[in-house]
Amino acid sequence: MPQMNAERDIVVAMTGASGAAYGLRLMERLSQAGIHQHVLLSEAARIVLKQEMGLELPDSPEQTTSALAEYLDISADRLTGYGLKDWFSPTASGSAGIRQMVVVPCSMGSLARIATGASDNLIERAADVMLKESRRLILVPRETPLSSIHLEHMLKLSRLGVHIIPAMPGFYHRPKDITELIDFIADRIMDHLEVENGEVKRWGA
Ligand SMILES: Cc1cc2nc3c(=O)[nH]c(=O)nc-3n(C[C@H](O)[C@H](O)[C@H](O)COP(=O)(O)O)c2cc1C
């Protein structure tokens, strides 16, 4: 297992919204930037990964991160996985000191539970830790259309300082393929994480 570096490590959670490719691309990019990630997957995220990416993951967190690393062709050392009830994970406590978390993609269900502090699984708890410790929490919601319930939760979280980065890629850079649309969102997340990202195309550059 890699050495934990709380200042630099990032929690990357995937939930059961459409857009699993965004989460995978972010993991790949962060690995390339040398960032160690604490990986959390909801049950629904596993279903979506299979549906959208054809990626069927094993049950155990260790085997899951190995399978993800193999799929992404990155070093398995960059990822540490935990089960959804692993309350001994460093992601479950503010005292571990991890500074940043991204939920990508973020389902409306997880968004609602984070907005209400449910903390019933490790994803919700880790997000709650970021909120209570005033650390950086980034949510990448995906749903359309949005109900007033969804919008109210997003507004509440935004007012708490959460970065809401909807999975809404722009088209002004004239994307040639889906990869460029996925990268559009991954780039915005990398910027908000303040991780060096040489690949990004910048407006006006
Ligand atoms: C293929 C697939 C796509 C889905 N897409 C979305 C979506 O885009 N947004 C959303 O909020 N829920 C979506 N759902 C429903 C969520 O997976 C469901 O509400 C689930 O309970 C969310 O659980 P979680 O937040 O623990 O991951 C989708 C489900 C499946 C199977």
Image (cartoon, helix red, strand yellow):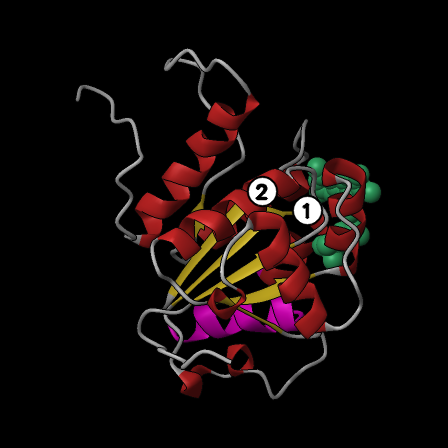
Ligand 1 is within 8 Å of the C-beta of the residue at disc 2? yes
Residue 164 at what x, y percent from top left? 46, 45
| 58 displayed left or right of 139 | right
Kindly indicate the quadrant of the structure image that contains residue 146.
top right
Q: Which residue is mark 1?
A: 108
In the rendered structure, does residue 3 fall within the stretch colored magenta? no
Residue 61 seen in this snapshot:
yes
Q: Which residue is mark 2?
A: 141
Kindly indicate the quadrant of the structure image that contains residue 65.
bottom right
| 180 displayed left or right of 20 | left
Residue 99 at what x, y percent from top left? 36, 70
In the rendered structure, does residue 124 fall within the stretch colored magenta? yes
Which residue is at a point 31% across and 74% down the rendered structure image?
7
Which residue is at a point 62% across and 67% down the rendered structure image?
124
Q: Quadrant of the C terminus?
A: top left
**Outermost residue toward the left?**
205
Report how far apart the C-alphas of labels 2 and 1 lie in the structure: 7 Å
Tell me the element at label 2: strand
Disc 1 packing (10 Å; few <14; some 14–19; many ≥20) = many
Three-letter code for the amino acid on which mark 1 is drawn: Met
**How many marks are shown on the rendered structure?**
2
Which residue is at a point 44% across and 74% down the rendered structure image?
132
Q: Are marks 2 and 1 in contact (CB under 8 Å)?
A: yes
Region in magenta: 115-134
Three-letter code for the amino acid on which mark 2 is drawn: Pro
Q: Main secondary structure of the magenta part?
A: helix
Residue 124, label in figure: none
